[in-house]
Amino acid sequence: MSKINKHKNDNVIVDFEQSDDAAVIDIGNNKYLVQTVDFFSPIVDDPFTFGQIAAANSLSDIYAMGAKPLFALNIVGFPTKELSNNILAEILKGGASLASKAGIPIVGGHSVDDSEIKYGLVVTGEVEKNKLIKNSNAKDGDLLLLTKPLGTGILYNALKKGLASYDDFHPAIKSMVETNKEIGSILNEFNVNAATDVTGYGLIGHLYEMCRAGNVSAEIESNKVPFFNNVEQFAKKGAIPGGTSRNLEFFSKHVEFKDSIQKHQKLMLADAQTSGGLLISLSKNDAYLLSSFCNKLSLGSAQIIGKFTSSNNPKIIFN
């Protein structure tokens, strides 16, 4: 995108230069339009479940910005000559089911004949101007909450390699089909300063984007970071996705690990996620209130994992 000549438009509030979760456009009447697109290849065998996961993942960017989704469009790649259209129908049914759970319609979309299955959504939402949450406003002293465990990438890779069973992967599937709707809808009640969702760049990548955008550093208590069961076991056995390794390699220059953190644990912290939770930055008092509220109502784990400090050299420190 850096090679594209950018056309200046005063109505554009957030675009690709901010590395935020979605584009934001001023449409007047004290409202912002929020729009995102995401799609990927299957990470489960069941087409209906894959459709649900892809839709939940696509919606997550809208919730991370404190916005309310309005409608969605399908985006599909499918090998029509090799596979039955019944499979495609199940994928679309899964997406529609998840969208219905989120309270929005899927009103159309676009498909192409592709050698590999791909599915996701373009999601359009809206938010009042004073309720927009970006990834760039973390404050000195803010605590950091993470609302879902990590490890979906490693667990899926372990399953593909025959190291893990379906029972090992099932908790991750259950998490991935859950939207961030409930937590996203209450963020503005707790004076959230910044938020983002954890997806392909993993905890390390998305957290560094928050640090860089807000001129803060993050101090993380490694033993507080939640993971699905057996993630460390499979990481030790080498079930590391390519995207996870690339995350650690790319962002490592911005990260300091204490000496006791081993290589496989570093990779766990960089694991590329699908339909992950939200990273939320807010004051100490509000952080404990939000964590308690979410845990009481079973709205994700809402684990406090660290804090932000002002910094002229943004980085992540894992203690």
Image (cartoon, helix red, strand yellow):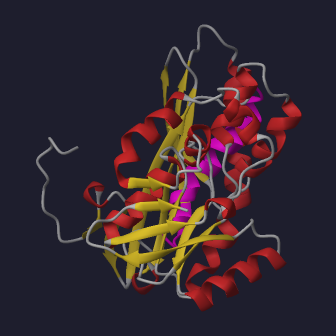
Identify whether 139 is placed above or below 256: below
At 62% across and 52% down in the image, what residue appears?
A: 276
- Coordinates of residue 26 in the picture (x, y in percent): 31, 73
Query: Residue 170 appears in which quarter of the rendering?
Result: top right
At 51% across and 71% down in the image, what residue appears?
A: 67
Residue lying farthest to the right in this orientation: 167
Q: Is residue 89 left or right of residue 41?
A: right
Q: Is residue 256 left or right of residue 310?
A: right
- Coordinates of residue 111 in the picture (x, y in percent): 50, 29
Residue lying farthest to the bottom in this orientation: 285
At 13% across and 56% down in the image, what residue appears?
A: 7
Magenta segment range? 45-70
Residue 103 seen in this snapshot: no
**Observer-nearest of 195 and 13:** 195
Q: Is residue 211 left or right of residue 44?
A: left
Identify whether 295 is placed above or below 164: below
* Quarter of the image where the N terminus is located: top left
- Coordinates of residue 165 in the picture (x, y in percent): 85, 28
Give the total number of marks visible in the rendering.
0
Residue 155 located within the stretch drawn in magenta: no
* Quarter of the image where the C terminus is located: bottom right
Q: Main secondary structure of the magenta part?
A: helix
At 53% across and 53% down in the image, what residue appears?
A: 203
**Observer-nearest of 174 and 146:** 146
**Observer-nearest of 208 and 298:** 208
